[in-house]
Image: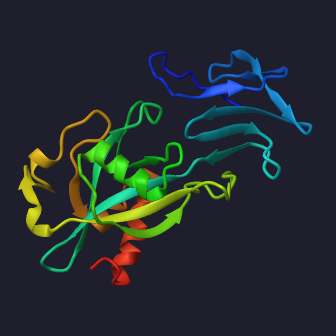
């Protein structure tokens, strides 16, 4: 097991708990690192928790690596249909500090549910926070998870990601510096997600963000079925 050093100024919001013993692993530089572990029913693992869910390193009952149980989440894909009947979907560029030294990834608004939020509530909140859009109409296009092997399904919570599509009238889009987007006044520049840009759906599918790719794919399927209108 390799451990990566998280930047000291990066607040991840996770807390370890239920420590009963220690384990020693080797970090990326070959240095031995000792840390606490927990044991439940003779299964050794370390559990990290936050308001977003549980991250479990160790044995999850089926796989001897790690597992994750989240509170649920949602992704909102703004879309517009061109005069030629082509599907355009929107995303912004989000910097992932722990991915490829802060690589920018093309992704639509979304995030984990907080507290007792429904997927719809989470989608609306994330879209307002990350894109400055108040949502009054959206279409559920499916559910999915980025990792089929290591997610623990929790039937009492929203699980795992619910994908929604948000219709935007083509007439409201403007071309700025060669990019199709909503007027700048409607989309504030924020820290985590850049201004939303509309691109052909197949171009959006080139994103390296697998959850984003899943959301775009679900939206494309709904479009092909005539569910988006």
178 versus 20 height, above or below: below
Q: Quadrant of the N terminus?
A: top right
Choose top left, top right, bottom left or bottom right for residue 105.
top left
User: How many marks on residues?
Assistant: 0
Residue at image position (83%, 49%) is: 61
Percent coordinates x, y for residue 95 in the rendering:
35, 36
Instruction: Describe residue 110's horizontal placement relative to residue 23 as left or right.
Output: left
Q: Position of residue 26 (x, y in %)?
A: 72, 22
Q: Say which residue appears at 77% left-offset and 21% top-offset.
A: 36
- Looking at the image, the residue that sits furthest to the bottom is 226
Can residue 107 be seen here?
A: no
**115 to 48, vertically: above or below:** below
Residue farthest to the front? Answer: 116
In this rendering, position of residue 220 left or right of residue 156:
left
Q: Identify the image quadrant of residue 78.
A: bottom left
User: Residue 91: x, y in percent?
Assistant: 29, 53
In x, y percent, where is residue 212?
41, 55
Task: Out of 206 and 68, give the one closest to the viewer.
Answer: 68
Q: Nearer the viewer, residue 192 or 31?
A: 192
Q: Residue at x 66, y 52 (%)?
A: 151
Q: Residue at image x 38%, y 84%?
A: 225
Q: Which part of the image, by quadrant, shows the C terminus?
A: bottom left
Q: Is 207 in front, or is 70?
A: 70
Does residue 196 appear in this view? yes
Q: Is residue 196 left or right of residue 115?
A: left
């Amino acid at each position: 097991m390799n451990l990566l050093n998280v930047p000291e100024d990066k607040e991840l919001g996770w807390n370890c708990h239920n420590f009963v013993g220690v384990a020693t692993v080797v970090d990326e530089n070959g240095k031995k690192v000792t840390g606490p572990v927990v044991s439940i029913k003779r299964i050794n693992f370390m559990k990290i928790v936050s308001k977003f869910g549980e991250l479990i390193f160790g044995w999850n009952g089926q796989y001897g690596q790690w597992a994750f149980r989240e509170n649920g989440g949602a992704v909102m894909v703004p879309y517009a249909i061109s005069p030629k009947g082509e599907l355009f979907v929107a995303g912004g560029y989000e910097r992932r500090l722990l991915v490829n030294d802060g690589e920018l990834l093309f992704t639509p608004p979304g995030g984990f549910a907080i507290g007792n939020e429904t997927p719809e509530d989470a989608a609306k909140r994330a879209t307002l926070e990350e894109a400055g859009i108040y949502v009054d109409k959206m279409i559920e296009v499916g559910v999915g998870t980025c990792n089929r092997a290591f997610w623990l399904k929790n039937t009492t919570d929203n699980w795992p990601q619910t994908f929604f599509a948000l219709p935007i009238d083509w007439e409201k889009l403007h071309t700025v510096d060669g990019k199709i987007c909503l007027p700048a006044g409607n989309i504030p520049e924020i820290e985590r997600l850049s201004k939303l840009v509309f691109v052909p759906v197949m171009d959006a599918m080139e994103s390296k963000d697998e959850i984003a790719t899943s959301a775009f794919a679900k939206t494309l399927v709904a479009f092909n079925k005539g569910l988006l209108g």
